[in-house]
Image: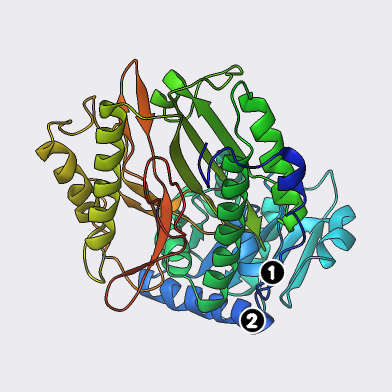
């Protein structure tokens, strides 16, 4: 169809897949130590004696352990002094040693034992009375701890955890940049293999295959492919669609590199766009650019959302979340979690600061017809923002040359 859309056979696309040539370095041991020291500073500022981080993205952030949460408690306890204390099932010790990136004192528990008692014991030994608990910890962990140290001694650790994770280091930015570069390359190939009648399922399979071939941690972390009227639903609808002339194509996908996410969306036309498709696509691109230009240190996150909505409201869309218009926030933070603080939405008054990373995706939905989402991520610099990926050029040229 064009030099960017529908110009490749599947074999030609696959021939371009090879391990990514320039890989970002993993997080160094010294950086993990710096993260603990930053957490200790925030603990002092918030007046708590200890921090408990449970399995999930924050545990990976502080220790390198990439485990998800389960019914068995795996957590790290940080106090004012001393090595972190790792609480873990005894039978998992070897597996944990293989991924742990920091020196830690271990408290191992057998299947019939109460791990929350080990946390309370370690706190008592180090003179810690108040505990900041990971905001992602399940209720059963809070209840288990309260039985030993009292509910009044437990406070949310949101300010500490987000305070550490919000601003990315150069090493984190490099991992995110590689992930974004890989996903944008996959987008190019996916647009290239489009043809009349291709199914959304075929494109999803290719995108996962491509991410794996390039060396992503685990293929596609997610993949949304929608055609025509299905693009009017921000996260799609069930079932397989087959591409027809004059339909918009929305592809939203990402991968992880060293645990850090990419998340890139492109919307483009198969065939020739009608006037309304062209108008809405152009408004979407203008709103995305307005949000980007509103970014600078000290600006509250909600102001970026306002900047995008102003463009749409002037054009007669909205206001607020009314449709046709923008049904959700303009963007979200990204890093070890695909959605994390801060958020570009009314009410989030977090002041932007260098190193913060967010998506910029003020989607426009025209109910019953179509939707357009262009999503690129940026990171905040000393004097504005910088894109991880160059934005789309036109409805029939989704990629910058």
Asked if residue 189 is positioned above or below residue 321 in the image, the reply reads below
Q: Total number of numbered labels?
A: 2
Instruction: Please state which of residues 289 and 332 is positioned toward the viewer in this rendering.
Output: 289
In screen coordinates, is 194 left or right of 346?
right
Q: Is residue 72 visible?
A: no
Protein image colouring: rainbow
Rendered location of residue 290, percent (x, y): 22, 54
| Front residue of 384 and 39 | 384
- Which residue is painted at 55% across and 58% down in the image? 180
Question: Which residue is identified by label 1?
Answer: 85
Q: Do the residues labelled 2 and 1 touch (CB within 8 Å)?
A: yes
Camera-side residue of 61 and 73: 61
- Residue 320 in percent (x, y) is at 18, 34
Q: Residue furthest bottom?
A: 30
Q: Quadrant of residue 322?
A: top left
**Residue 82, labelled with which disc?**
2
Q: Is residue 359 above or below residue 354?
A: above
In this picture, residue 78 sits left or right of residue 276: right
Q: In the rendering, at what x and y percent does residue 240 appear?
A: 61, 18
* Residue under the image location 47 percent in, 44 percent down: 265
Q: Can residue 220 be seen in this view?
A: yes
Dot 2 falls on a residue whose secondary structure is: loop
In the rendering, at what x and y percent does residue 17 appear?
Answer: 74, 54
At x 66%, y 42%, the residue is 8
Graded by Cα atoms within 10 Å as few (under 14), some (14 to 19) or many (20 or more), the crowding at tag 1 reads many
The image quarter containing residue 214 is bottom right
Front position in the image: 49 or 369: 369
Mark linked to residue 210: none
Q: How far apart are marks 2 and 1 (CA)?
A: 9 Å
- What crowding class fits label 2: few (fewer than 14 Cα within 10 Å), some (14-19), or many (20 or more)? few
């Amino acid at each position: 169809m064009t030099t960017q859309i529908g110009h490749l056979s599947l074999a030609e696309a696959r021939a371009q897949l090879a391990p990514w040539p320039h890989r970002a370095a993993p997080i160094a041991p010294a950086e993990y130590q710096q993260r603990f020291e930053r957490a200790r500073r925030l603990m002092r500022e918030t007046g708590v004696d200890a921090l408990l981080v449970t399995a999930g993205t924050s545990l990976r952030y502080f220790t390198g352990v990439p485990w998800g949460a389960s019914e068995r408690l795996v957590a790290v306890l940080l106090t004012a002094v001393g090595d972190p204390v790792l609480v873990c099932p005894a039978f998992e010790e070897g597996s944990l040693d293989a991924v742990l990136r920091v020196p830690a004192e271990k408290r191992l528990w057998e299947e019939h034992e109460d791990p929350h008692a080990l946390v309370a014991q370690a706190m008592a030994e180090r003179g810690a009375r108040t505990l900041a608990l990971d905001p992602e910890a399940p209720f059963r962990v809070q209840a288990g701890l309260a039985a030993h140290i009292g509910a009044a001694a437990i406070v949310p650790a949101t300010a500490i955890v987000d305070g550490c994770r919000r601003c990315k280091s150069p090493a984190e930015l490099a991992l995110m940049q590689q992930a974004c570069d890989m996903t944008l390359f996959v987008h190019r190939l996916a647009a290239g293999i489009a043809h009349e009648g291709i199914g959304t399922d075929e494109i999803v399979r290719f995108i996962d295959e491509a991410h794996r071939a390039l060396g992503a941690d685990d293929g596609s972390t997610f993949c949304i492919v929608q055609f025509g009227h299905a693009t009017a639903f921000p996260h799609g609808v069930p079932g397989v669609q087959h591409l027809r002339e004059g339909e918009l194509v929305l592809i939203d996908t990402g991968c992880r590199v060293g645990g850090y996410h990419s998340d890139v969306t492109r919307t483009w036309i198969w065939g020739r766009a009608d006037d309304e498709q062209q108008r809405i696509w152009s408004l979407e691109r203008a709103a995305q650019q307005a949000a980007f230009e509103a970014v600078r240190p000290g600006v509250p996150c909600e102001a970026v959302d306002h900047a995008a909505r102003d463009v749409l409201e002037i054009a007669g869309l909205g206001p607020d979340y009314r449709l046709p218009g923008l049904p959700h926030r303009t963007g979200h933070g990204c890093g070890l979690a695909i959605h994390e603080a801060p958020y570009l939405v009314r009410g989030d008054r977090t002041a932007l600061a260098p190193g913060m990373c967010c998506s910029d995706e003020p989607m426009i939905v025209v109910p019953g017809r179509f939707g357009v989402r262009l999503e690129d991520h940026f990171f905040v610099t000393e004097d504005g923002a910088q894109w991880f990926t160059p934005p789309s050029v036109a409805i029939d040229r989704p990629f910058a040359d």
